[in-house]
Amino acid sequence: DKEDLYNNPIHPYTRALLAAIPVANPEYKSDMSIIKGEIPSNVNLPKGCKFNTRCPFAKEICKEQVPETREIEKGHFCACHFAGEI
């Protein structure tokens, strides 16, 4: 459910997107992060995991193999080689 997505993001891309959400409070010091790395071309997607060029956890397997979508927790699915470990 949506609460789980916000409170327990499993995929690195989901984590990065949530960390980049600006806070609409000028007094709040945000830790808003920028997703670093090379933005892949939509016409020439990278081999393996499509997020491997920007993922801080990417390893060789991420560049070679597309990760399978697995159920990490009941009703919580993720396509990441390291889901549940990071």
Image (cartoon, grey):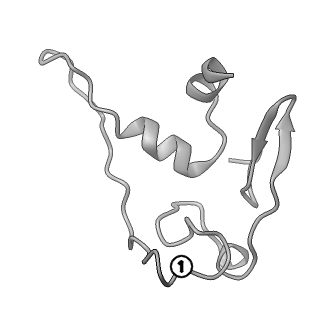
Q: Quadrant of the N terminus?
A: top right
| Apparent side of residue 65 relative to residue 42 in the rendered image (left or right) | right
Q: Quadrant of residue 32?
A: top left
Name the residue nearer the viewer: 4 or 29: 4
Q: Quadrant of residue 25?
A: top left
Residue in the image at 27% along x and 31% along y: 22
- Secondary structure beneath dot 1 equals loop
**Residue 52 percent coordinates (x, y):** 56, 70
Is 11 located above or below residue 30 in the figure? Answer: below
**Residue 67 percent coordinates (x, y):** 76, 65
| Apparent side of residue 67 relative to residue 47 in the rendered image (left or right) | right
| Apparent side of residue 25 relative to residue 34 in the rendered image (left or right) | left
Residue in the image at 34% along x and 34% along y: 21
- The crowd level at tag 1 (other Cα within 10 Å; few <14, some 14-19, many 20+) is few
Most extreme residue toward the left, as rendered? Answer: 26
Read off the residue under disc 1. Answer: 45
Is 4 located above or below residue 82 in the figure? Answer: above
**Residue 54 percent coordinates (x, y):** 46, 65
Q: Quadrant of residue 4?
A: top right
Residue in the image at 42% along x and 78% along y: 41
Residue in the image at 38% along x and 73% along y: 38
**Residue 9 percent coordinates (x, y):** 61, 35
The amino acid beneath tag 1 is: Leu
Is 33 located above or below residue 74 in the figure? Answer: below
Q: How many marks?
A: 1
